[in-house]
Amino acid sequence: MQDILNQIRELLNQGFQEICLTGVDICSYNTDEINFSKLTATILTQIPELPSLQFGSLDPAAIDDDFIKLVKEYKNIHPHFHLSIQSGDNMVLKRMKRRHTREDVISLCHKIRAIRPEATFGADFICGFPTETDEQFQNTIKLVHDAGINKLHVFPYSERSGTPAALMPQVPVEIRRERARLLRQEGESTDE
């Protein structure tokens, strides 16, 4: 914790105005005494002069009510939240071993917008995960609208040998690419 606080102070002393906490699974930050929400609260209380605190790759399943209270209380939390969603279909999410559902994502976005109406959301999505049907892909497009996500990072699925997904029936590469193109296009239309 002290290393994090020292690094932020050093960056502020160098003139940086925005700090972004990010990582592969940043919301799972957890020591014996402190979790992600407590880490965020400690930064905000110990460094009140911090102009802007941002977050990258937030796991929707790991965002707790304590974090949402901080978003409400601290206006120096930047109101853009980038979520690691991956899919808008519950069966695909289950196969990906994600800990959230599409309903969790929609609820989270609505909760944050209720306390910070200016909030915007970005998200990571993978198109063409093994076994993904056209209907399941359409659920992802629908989620973008239902949750009001307007900054999309979209990738076609790519196999990684040795993973459980590599053993599943694969979606043809051309379909993955086309779905990624369509989802990017959808994201552009919601960003207008």
Image (tube, rainbow, N blue to C red):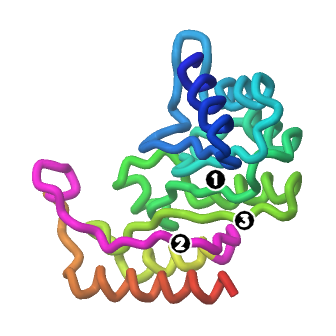
Residue 66, located in which quarter of the rendered image?
A: top right
Residue beneath disc 1 = 104
Q: Residue furthest front?
A: 14
Camera-side residue: 161 or 135?
161
> Is 153 one of the magenta-colored residues?
yes
Residue 32, located in which quarter of the rendered image?
A: top right
Which residue is rendered at x = 51% and y = 73% of the image? 140
Q: Please give the range of residues in magenta.
A: 145-166
SS at circle 2: strand
The numbered mark at residue 120 is 3
Q: Quadrant of the N terminus?
A: top right
Question: Label 2 neighbourhood size at 10 Å, few (<14), some (14-19), many (20+)?
Answer: many
Q: Position of residue 89 (x, y in %)?
A: 48, 66
Which residue is rendered at x = 46% and y = 42% of the image? 23
In the displayed structure image, the side of residue 182 where residue 71 appears, left or right: right
Residue beneath disc 2 = 152
Which residue is rendered at x = 78% and y = 45% of the image? 51
Query: Earlier along the polypeptide chain: callout 1 or callout 3?
Result: 1
Query: Earlier along the polypeptide chain: callout 2 or callout 3?
Result: 3
Question: Label 3 neighbourhood size at 10 Å, few (<14), some (14-19), many (20+)?
Answer: some
Camera-side residue: 148 or 52?
52
How many dots with numbers? 3
In the displayed structure image, the side of residue 139 where residue 50 appears, left or right: right
